[in-house]
Image: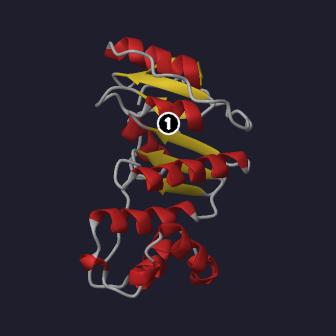
Amino acid sequence: MGVLGRNGSGKSTLLKILARITSPTEGTAVLSGRVGALLEIGTGFHPDLSGRENILLNGTMLGMTPTEVGRREDAIIEFSEVGDFIDTPVKHYSSGMFMRLAFAVAAHLDAEIMLVDEVLAVGDAAFQEKCKNKIREIARSGRTVLFTSHDMAAVMRICNSGIVLDGGRLDYSGSAREAVARYCRLMGVPLPQEPAAEDDFHAVSVNFNKSL
């Protein structure tokens, strides 16, 4: 599900409520399943620790056990494409390398619900595409993904449903394409070209009836 809206509309607040980082001023959020949040990439990384050590540190902070981290370490390193520098302190990484490793750790968290907030803005085009494909893979596996972005083409590609927030309130809920169209009308920008059709995955049904 895409979560759309102009800056300050409540997108990040909603995801922080669902991630139990922020408490709602009214209403409740009920989740069933393990939650993985890609809200601020790299939170908890220690600059003096190596990439490998930060995989363990960040993985456990995200809710994985050391055994789970060890089992996924090779896949995380391969996905991040920083294998040649994995034993180098991350303070020597470029911002792109740092983002690659941090996203790889979070993306390999075995969670039923993934919250993804504008984490694809850093990194080269090829790695951004790889991240989008990973998010679609997570969704196709039967897990729930809430994805917020100002990249409307990415929303239409990754999501099959969407909501639009305006001033902290629900403005629209329906298909991803219609949510994008509604957002573009609110912002006064043209509707992006719809991406080529890809394999469908199960729709997510979510009801919102409270202001944030």
Q: Is residue 27 visible?
A: no
Task: Write the residue at 43% across / 25% down.
Answer: 211
Task: Write the residue at 42% across / 82% down.
Answer: 84
Task: Compare residues 60 and 102 and report the one nearer the observer.
Answer: 102
Against 22, residue 109 (above or below) is below
Count residues near mark 1 (Cα–Cα under 10 Å), then give few for <14, some for 14-19, many for 20+. Answer: some
* Residue 145 on image: x %, y %: 59, 44
* Residue 204 on image: x %, y %: 67, 34
Task: Compare residues 124 and 69 and report the one nearer the observer.
Answer: 124
Task: Compare residues 75 and 141 and report the one nearer the observer.
Answer: 75
Task: Write the residue at 50% across / 65% down.
Answer: 104
* Residue 80 on image: x %, y %: 48, 68
Callout count: 1
Colouring: secondary structure
Q: Amino acid at mark 1?
A: Ala
Task: Write the residue at 41% across / 79% down.
Answer: 54
Q: In which quarter of the view is residue 149 placed?
A: top left
Q: Is residue 39 left or right of residue 74?
A: left
Q: Is residue 65 left or right of residue 211?
A: right
Q: Is residue 155 left or right of residue 22?
A: right
Against 205, residue 127 (above or below) is below
Q: Is residue 133 left or right of residue 56?
A: right
Residue carrying label 1:
154
Q: In which quarter of the view is residue 50 placed?
A: bottom left
Q: Quadrant of the C terminus?
A: top left
Q: Quadrant of the N terminus?
A: top right
Q: Is residue 89 visible?
A: yes
* Residue 43 on image: x %, y %: 35, 65
- SS category of the residue bearing label 1: helix
